Image: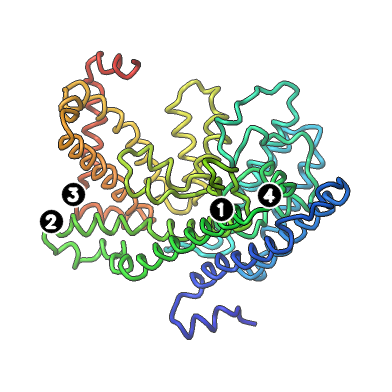
């Protein structure tokens, strides 16, 4: 029996896999509405009775599990067994080795890494795969993070952390003292609005959300609805821009003879625009899933300045992303919760190395492998990110040493010019690296970069070499 989206695809001309992805994301919205209507606000008699409140939490968990499994079945079809097998094996491994948690975590990491990379090779093609490997890569990080939280919870002496210094997605309460019930972990893995493309968050946050009793007021409901609608419309806007404009700038055009025959200035302009639209679709789908997550109330941050805030699991900040003037700002505004996950479960776990650059390189290597080792374009992209971060720091030091930074601060006009140049340079670096990410194949990336003379690679190399000639006062200025 064919999937229902096959018939819709035949009638509309939309690629079937893309249509199935979009419909799965959209179906999380009615699921969140039903949740809020039935389970969102427990009656006061339930809140006052601990036994009834526990039963209410179990009912919430069952709803999340059933809707999540239904959406996963809709997206994956028979291939849902991959994620089910992963959950059963990982949970059994943690349960059997509950007295040796480090070994349990090592087993979970190894199993998920091997299973995911095998899936990438099994489903490999020359294009992006919208298949069971997409939710599997999200599940991979979810289980790896839970395994580390299980290890942390078993440590007798743990360093206390300031909760205000941690994001909502991975709070200071993330360590798990005991292995949670299997049905709760399963619902956490299949969370309806987050199992497919994220966002990542800790099991502890899910536990807190299950027991949450939100303020019973129309103000909260209105703020929640407005935020969800804003994310929904923002997501549709980015997807519409991608479909109407971005589709005219496919990265595959950059490797054609027609593109190579264009005048140099045109090639540079088209190359820049193509790189820009590489990322537009990601902003669209992340905003869609953020709206549904806000609808469930999972990203609720509390009340501030009289306004209820639901952006706790924001995976992209469109305003910051579109106006960034630093590569670090890109990291803080794009795929936010995956970056948080990498920070707390990979980067900070490598502090024993004693070298920040080595830890950073290893983290980016992990992320490249997570995207897929069958495409070297991922490794080239993350290597560029690592080198760009180093080059940006060197460039900033040179601007201070040469007095250029101080000259830009003279008046409003020069400060505005500095902001524009920083924005343009930052975006150019991002879009340049995005071409390799989209083309995947290194030989195709070589063809594309050759048409623009590898201009960013040359600039990057020049800056990195110039770092060896920085005067000592630049290093002193940085320390100050």
Indicate the position of residue 162 as horizontal and vertical percent values.
60, 26
**Relative side of 157 to 454, left or right:** right
Indicate the position of residue 453 as horizontal and vertical percent values.
18, 49
Residue at point 52%, 23% (across, down) = 353
Q: Distance from label 2 to label 4 (Cα)? A: 56 Å
Q: Are marks 2 and 1 in contact (CB under 8 Å)?
A: no
Q: Are marks 2 and 3 in contact (CB under 8 Å)?
A: no
Indicate the position of residue 439 as horizontal and vertical percent values.
36, 58
* Residue 120 in view in this figure: no
Q: Secondary structure at mark 1?
A: loop
Based on the displayed image, in which of its 4 quarters is residue 219 positioned? bottom right
Number of other residues with Cα within 10 Å of mark 1, as a class: few under 14, some 14 to 19, many 20 or more: many
Q: Distance from label 2 to label 1 (Cα)? A: 39 Å
Work out whether residue 335 or residue 124 is closer to the camera in this orientation and state it. Answer: 335
**Relative side of 7 to 238, left or right:** right
Q: Secondary structure at mark 4?
A: loop
Which sits earlier in the primary sequence, circle 2 or circle 4?
Answer: 4
Residue at point 46%, 45% (across, down) = 368
Q: Which residue is mark 2?
A: 265
Residue at point 29%, 49% (across, down) = 432
Number of other residues with Cα within 10 Å of mark 2, as a class: few under 14, some 14 to 19, many 20 or more: few
Q: Secondary structure at mark 2?
A: helix
* Residue 61 in view in this figure: yes
Q: Which residue is mark 3?
A: 453
Which sits earlier in the primary sequence, circle 4 or circle 1?
Answer: 1
Q: Are marks 4 and 1 in contact (CB under 8 Å)?
A: no
Q: Which residue is mark 1?
A: 198
């Amino acid at each position: 029996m064919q999937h229902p989206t096959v018939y819709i695809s035949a009638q509309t001309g939309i690629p079937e896999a893309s249509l199935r992805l979009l419909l799965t994301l959209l179906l999380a919205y009615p699921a969140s509405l039903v949740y809020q209507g039935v389970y969102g606000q427990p009656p006061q008699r339930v809140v006052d009775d601990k036994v009834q409140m526990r039963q209410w939490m179990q009912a919430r968990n069952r709803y999340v599990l059933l809707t999540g499994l239904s959406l996963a079945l809709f997206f994956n079809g028979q291939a849902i067994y991959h994620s089910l097998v992963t959950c059963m094996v990982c949970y059994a491994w943690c349960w059997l080795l509950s007295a040796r948690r480090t070994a349990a975590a090592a087993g979970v990491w190894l199993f998920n890494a091997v299973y995911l990379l095998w899936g990438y090779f099994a489903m490999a093609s020359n294009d992006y795969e919208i298949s069971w490997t997409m939710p599997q890569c999200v599940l991979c990080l979810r289980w790896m993070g839970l395994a580390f939280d299980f290890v942390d919870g078993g440590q007798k002496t743990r360093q206390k952390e300031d909760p205000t210094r941690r994001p909502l997605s991975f709070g200071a309460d993330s360590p798990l003292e005991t292995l949670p019930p299997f049905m709760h972990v399963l619902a956490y893995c299949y969370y309806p609005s987050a199992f497919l493309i994220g966002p990542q968050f800790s099991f502890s946050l899910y536990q807190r959300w299950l027991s949450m009793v939100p303020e019973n007021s129309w103000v909260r409901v209105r703020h929640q609805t407005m935020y969800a609608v804003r994310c929904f419309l923002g997501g549709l806007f980015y997807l519409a821009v991608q479909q109407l404009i971005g589709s005219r700038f496919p990265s595959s055009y950059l490797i054609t003879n027609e593109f190579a025959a264009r005048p140099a200035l045109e090639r540079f302009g088209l190359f820049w625009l193509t790189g820009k639209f590489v990322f537009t679709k990601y902003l669209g789908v992340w905003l869609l899933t953020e709206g549904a997550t806000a609808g469930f109330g999972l990203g609720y941050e509390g009340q501030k300045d009289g306004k209820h805030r639901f952006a706790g699991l924001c995976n992209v900040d469109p305003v910051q992303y579109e106006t960034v003037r630093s590569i670090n700002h890109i990291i803080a505004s794009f795929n936010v919760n995956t970056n948080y996950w990498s920070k707390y479960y990979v980067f900070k776990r490598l502090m024993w190395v004693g070298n920040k650059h080595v830890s950073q390189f290893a983290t980016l290597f992990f992320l490249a492998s997570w995207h897929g080792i069958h495409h070297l374009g991922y490794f080239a992209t993350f290597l560029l990110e690592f080198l760009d971060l180093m080059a940006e720091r060197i460039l900033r030091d040179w601007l201070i040493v040469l007095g250029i930074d101080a000259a830009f601060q003279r008046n409003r006009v020069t400060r505005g010019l500095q902001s524009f140049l920083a924005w343009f340079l930052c975006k150019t670096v991002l879009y340049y690296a995005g071409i390799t990410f989209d083309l995947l194949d290194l030989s195709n990336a070589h063809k594309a970069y050759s048409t623009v003379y590898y201009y960013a690679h040359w600039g990057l190399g020049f800056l990195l070499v110039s770092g060896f000639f920085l005067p000592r006062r630049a290093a002193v200025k940085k320390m100050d």
